[in-house]
Amino acid sequence: MEKPQTLKIYLSTFISILFLAFSLNAQTDFKAYNGRVVDGQSNKTLEAVSLNINGTNISTITNSEGEFKLKVPSNYSDAKLMVSSLGYNTYVLPLSELSNEESTIKLYPAITELSAVSISTYKDAEGLVRKVFEDKNKNLEEESIFMTAFYRETIKRRSRNVSLTEAIVNILKEPNGSKQQDAIQLGKARKSTDYKRLDTVSVKLQGGPFSTLYMDIMKYPEYIFTDESIKSYRFSFDKPSTINNKTVYVVNFSPKNSEFRINYIGKLFIDVESLALVSANYNLDLSNKRKTKNLLVSRKPRDVVVYPLEANYKVDYKANGNKWYYSYSTLSLKFKVNKKRQLFNKVYTLASEMAVTDWEINVADKKIRNKDKLRPTVIITDAISGFSDPNFWGKYNLIEPDKSIQSAIDKIRKNIEKQKEKEKSNTVAGTP
């Protein structure tokens, strides 16, 4: 078989394995709660719903099937669970009400009305957006923060999984005014890649967890809204919405023209009271095929041409008191690969997501040693190896795998078990 050529995809607009030397949640005695979240009216499962233990920084989110697993230290068994999603009323319930098996939590759409004062305060949507970025420091923590996060990266050819990577990482997030760069340390990790399904092109994401961390546009606004680029966008108000029982402005934005090679179309969700960014959903404008050819590509073979078909991004923030923190981000890239002398092109989908599952203000001034830091150019699939058993993650919170991913994991695990049985049988047979 021809050796796969490497095609590295990276976010040009963002942008030895060590186990954790420390943990934000040191307790080993915990209980896991399973369930799913649905729309109370339509019974439709809800994706990326935030679940947080009240009074703590322990959290997780639902997967694309609305499923979740939340691991909670036993000393919080009497705590309450807050379940929230954009456009829905926040639901609070005691952990004791969750069943031992799978619980179903229903969220109901919120009816949102802005007061006359709020409506008249910002008639100019662009002025509101500028205000958000100009005053961002008052809403963000002024000290460094240590975060534990779950990172997942998948690559598909058409609808078939060819690569799955998962990791627990520690993030040292520096305040906006600091000259120090945010740092990431790789902790527990596992992967599986089936290069046979990639044919002659090996597709990899350059940046790993940094590809999602750099989507924190409040920390890295230069990747989307600079003083220069913000003038090239058209902003308008949409119908207001609700998150965590708080009203948010909804601002649409789109490019006025195609002056820049990279333009975005999307929505910003801004808290009415604090003017903090709550969430942002946007996608790359790929309408000009000639201009976007080979966009997002770091390296490729000469005989390959790449056309991005979709590039979707989402980032969420969570409030704690009067401060807001990076909480979750996800990206999805879909592109077509044309290779000379091949009749059919290939379509790949690459997705990554990172969810902060625990954090603390870094009062102890913890550091990540230089030799332990991941580089922003890391290819995470090359940095780790192997899959592991179902209890691999222990007490760590993570995003429940999608059914398609779970099927891939199950198949991989069966192959590992077969290989172990085969090795065991050969050992017995060779015994004198």
Image: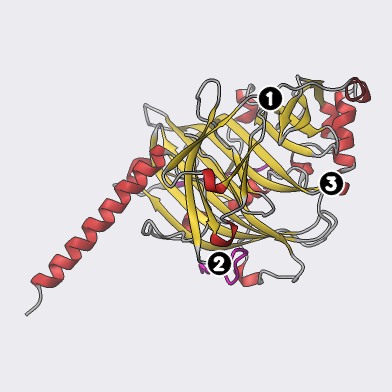
Q: Residue at x 84, y 57 (%)?
A: 142
Extreme-bottom residue of the structure: 432
- Amino acid bearing label 2: Gln
Pointer 1 and pointer 3: residues touching (CB < 8 Å)? no
Say above or below: 168 vs 310.
below
Structural distance between the alpha carbons of marks 3 and 2? 31 Å
Query: SS class of the residue under badge 1?
Result: loop
- Amino acid bearing label 3: Asn
State which quadrant residue 172 falls in.
bottom right
The residue indicated by pointer 2 is 27
Q: Position of residue 36 (x, y in %)?
A: 49, 37
The residue indicated by pointer 1 is 110
Q: What range is drawn magenta here?
A: 6-27
Q: Nearer the viewer, residue 298 or 176?
A: 176
In-image side of 174 versus 397 (left or right): right
Earlier-in-chain disc, 3 versus 2: 2
Q: Is residue 12 magenta?
A: yes
Residue 263 appears in view: no
Q: Is residue 193 magenta?
A: no
Structural distance between the alpha carbons of marks 2 and 1? 37 Å
Residue 139, numbered label: 3
Earlier-in-chain disc, 1 versus 3: 1
State which quadrant residue 198 falls in.
top left
